Image (cartoon, rainbow, N blue to C red):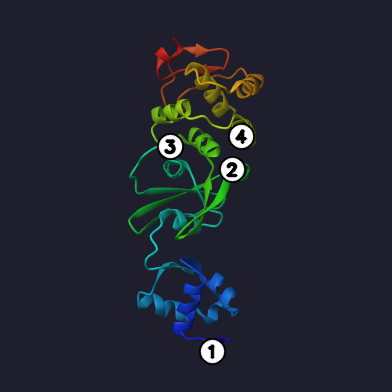
Amino acid sequence: MNNNLDFLKVIRIIDENRLSFFTSNELAEIIGVETKSIQNYLETLANNELIIRVEKGKYCRTYMKDRLVIGSKLIRGGVVSYQTALIHHELIQDNSNKVFIASDHQKNNKSLFGYQFRFIKISSHKYFGFYEEENRNGEFRVTDPEKTILDCFDLPQYATSYEKLISIFGGIHFDEEKLIEYGLKMQNLSVLKRLAYLSEQLHVPGYHKFKKTVENLTNDKYTLLNPSGPDIGPFHTKWKIRDNMNQSMAQ
């Protein structure tokens, strides 16, 4: 089949299969040839600006600038997460050019098409809670709202301001069962304690089972409400939380 290939046929196959972002291995499998036999075709198409060489072995169409699709495909197992997932779920409004992608693999950050792709390697036990979504440019993985809010409280440096995170949690009703299930799988008791404390202080309706579960897990170690804040503020014995942010919350 390789002898019958030409540049027009390769680009036609890319079009017919709606390959907005693809690897040379994926395209070779579709055509039914070895990867090395189409490499020269792809490089020529890229040199003639019919496709864009994103990095070695990865290409996209010239019209393709979708940060979610590209970001999730730049790394094996990539998932749109943290601040970018908050924006996607319309939990915050932000015009940031940073795109946060979580994966259980390692990759250096990359600037592309005016975006800064930040790749966050997470432990395998935190790699869950996402689903496949599709738009006109292709498919991508994204964390669901419950995993997103837990991830952001777990690693707030990749989210938004901590005050805004608290406001999101206080103003949006998240699935209580998922918060419990996901929180336990993430193995971060501090996050669960913070959310249980906040749900009580902010008088968030519901979360009765969530708070009961966390209360039964709470140990004697005190946790700062804001992990990056100073070690000050009142102690709350029920949740073993030291409120180092707004002391009026407890009043």
Residue 136: horizontal and vertical position, in percent?
A: 45, 59
Q: Residues within 10 Å of mark 1 (few under 14, many from 20)?
A: few
Quarter of the figure that contains the C terminus: top left
Q: The disc labelled 1 sits on which kind of residue?
A: Asn
Quarter of the figure that contains the N terminus: bottom right
* Quadrant in the rendering for residue 43: bottom left
Kindly state the secondary structure of the residue where label 2 is placed.
Answer: loop
Residue at image coords 46%, 25%: 170
In the rendered structure, find residue 91 and report the number of the disc placed on it: 3
Kindly state the secondary structure of the residue where label 1 is placed.
Answer: helix
Identify the mark nearer the N-term, 1 or 3. Answer: 1
**Total labels drawn:** 4
In the rendered structure, find residue 180 and report the number of the disc placed on it: none
| CA distance for labels 1 and 4 | 53 Å
Can you identify the residue that label 2 sits on? 129
Can you identify the residue that label 4 sits on? 178
Can you identify the residue that label 1 sits on? 4
Residue 101 is at least partly visible in this image: yes
Q: The disc labelled 4 sits on which kind of residue?
A: Lys
Residue at image coords 52%, 71%: 17
| CA distance for labels 1 and 2 | 45 Å
Q: Looking at the image, which residue sits at the far top? A: 251
Kindly state the secondary structure of the residue where label 4 is placed.
Answer: helix
Q: Residues within 10 Å of mark 4 (few under 14, many from 20)?
A: some
